[in-house]
Amino acid sequence: MQETWLRTLAWTDYRLAVILTVLVPIILTVWALLKRENVLLQLLIIYWRVSSLLMITVYLLIPGWRIGFISGWLSRFLIAIALWFWVDINEDITEQPDSSLKLTFAAWRWANTIYNVVGGLMFTPFLSCAINSNLTPTPFCQIWTEAPWLYREILHRAYKPEFLGFWGAMGLGVYALYLAHFLIVRLGKQGRSALEP
């Protein structure tokens, strides 16, 4: 019974993630490009940079690597922070004239933030999967690798899980270096005005 409930929770979470963190932002990005809404586009670019950790997490979980539980949990809070951290962008968005794009963007921004914060808090007990000393994953942990495994079966069936995990680890290394550079060098020197590439 508990395993069924956990599986339902995990698959619901993955479905919501696809909708709120991939499909809707793609639509909003294309819409903002077509409407030449540079302020919204600027925040969406920041969002895509930060949320790339979600895709890295999928590749880390394909072979069942424990670090994927940490990166998945951390990505939720980084996304929520990235959507609201920039005071100047927030002010510029507020000053934009009302439009269906602005309203849709605001609704997605709040929905994404709530989803990631609540999801991150609910996922916290699963961080124990990252420090579990048992070499055989428990059903409690293994349930979270089912969706990444299905993703692999659909798109990367010809590749071994460890090969895909290797690319996930490489992506995590690049992500960590970029994040460290941003936090230490750019944000440390420029503060919240460290937006320019």
Image (cartoon, rainbow, N blue to C red):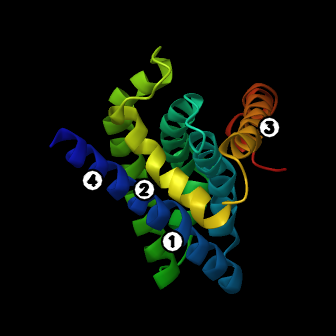
The disc, 2 or 4, on the residue closer to the chain's N-terminal end is 4
For residue 14, the mark is 2
Three-letter residue code for mark 4: Thr
Judged from the image, the secondary structure of the residue bearing numbered disc 1 is helix
Q: Nearer the viewer, mark 4 or mark 1?
A: 4
For residue 5, the mark is none
Judged from the image, the secondary structure of the residue bearing numbered disc 3 is helix
Q: Is residue 53 above or below residue 38?
A: above
The disc, 2 or 1, on the residue closer to the chain's N-terminal end is 2
Q: How many numbered discs, if any?
A: 4
Q: Residue at x 38, y 43 (%)?
A: 143
> In 3D space, how far apart are the residues under numbered discs 4 and 1 (Cα atoms)?
23 Å
Name the residue furthest left.
Answer: 1
Q: Residue at x 30, y 49 (%)?
A: 7
**In the picture, residue 171 is in which quadrant?**
top right
The residue that mark 4 highlights is 8
Judged from the image, the secondary structure of the residue bearing numbered disc 4 is helix
| Residue 138 or residue 89, whichever sits in front | 138
The disc, 2 or 3, on the residue closer to the chain's N-terminal end is 2
Q: Residues within 10 Å of mark 4 (few under 14, many from 20)?
A: few
Please report contact status of discs 3 and 1: CB closer than 8 Å, yes or no: no
The residue that mark 3 highlights is 174
